[in-house]
Image (cartoon, rainbow, N blue to C red):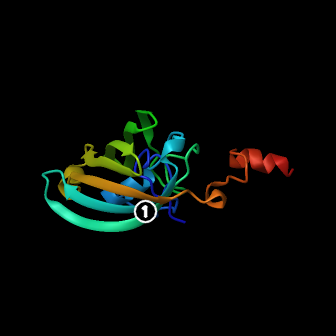
């Protein structure tokens, strides 16, 4: 099931499909955008279904791609910061209001001994009436003493611009949470 939401809105409904990573291969900037989508409670004002237009650029401003999508944002809900099964866990900080948000998320992942991929995602967005606009910049750098770490892993920087237009309310059954948030260990204790 895809839940997108660009940070607040990416901080909201999220692409909740797990991202699989091959050994010694860092996630791409696109995969990072899918993993970092949600770490705070989404204000109710962002609730709804949206038609979305995305533009992707490198950080020099060169256009890379456009795309369209549908998005459902469940206001008043919180989401986990990383995709299930992901080797990367993001630490995010930021602020939200009913109409704006800003957020920065960081993480690192050991690719192999003495080589670490470092991730930084900075996002800000606004909503007015029935439209939102969000800009997110994803930076991936590499550090470590292995001489091949910086030779084979070039830094990456992408900017994602997301325009959403509300098309209706979020479906109640889509946004319902039928279970209580808990850890797997706590779930197992209920049945022992």
In-image side of 154 versus 164 (left or right): left
Dot 1: element: loop
Residue 92: x and y, percent? 43, 37
Q: Name the residue under label 1.
A: 21
Q: How crowded is mark 1: few (under 14 residues within 10 Å), some or many (20 or more)?
A: some
Total marks shown come to 1
Front-most of residues 59 and 71: 71
- Residue 9, compared with residue 50, is above or below; it is above
- For image coordinates 48% across by 47% down, the residue present is 46
Residue 122: x and y, percent? 32, 41
Whether residue 114 is visible here, answered yes or no, is no
- For image coordinates 33% across by 48% down, the residue present is 134
Residue 191: x and y, percent? 85, 52
Front-most of residues 53 and 45: 45
Front-most of residues 93 and 134: 134
Residue that extends furthest to the right in the rendered view of this protein: 192
Whether residue 126 is visible here, answered yes or no, is yes
Residue 53: x and y, percent? 32, 62
- For image coordinates 49% across by 46% down, the residue present is 81
Residue that extends furthest to the front in the rendered view of this protein: 129
In-image side of 116 versus 156 (left or right): right
Quadrant (top left/top right/bottom left/bottom right) for the N terminus: bottom right
């Amino acid at each position: 099931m895809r839940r997108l939401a660009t940070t607040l809105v990416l901080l909201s409904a999220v692409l909740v499909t797990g991202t699989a990573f091959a050994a010694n291969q860092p996630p791409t900037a696109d995969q990072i955008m899918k993993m970092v989508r949600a770490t705070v409670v989404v204000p109710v004002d962002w609730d709804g279904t949206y038609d979305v237009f995305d533009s992707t650029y490198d950080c020099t401003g060169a256009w890379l791609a456009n795309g369209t999508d549908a998005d459902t944002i469940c206001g008043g809900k919180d989401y986990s910061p990383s995709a299930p099964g992901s080797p990367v866990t993001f630490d995010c900080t930021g602020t939200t209001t009913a109409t704006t948000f800003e957020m920065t998320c960081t993480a690192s992942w050991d690719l192999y001994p003495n080589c670490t991929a470092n991730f930084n995602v900075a996002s800000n967005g606004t909503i007015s009436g029935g439209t939102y606009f969000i800009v997110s910049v994803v930076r991936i750098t590499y550090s470590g003493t292995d001489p091949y770490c910086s030779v084979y892993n070039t830094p990456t920087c992408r900017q994602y611009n997301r325009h959403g237009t509300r098309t209706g309310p979020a479906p109640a059954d889509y946004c319902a949470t039928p279970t209580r948030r808990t850890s797997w260990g706590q779930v197992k204790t209920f049945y022992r």
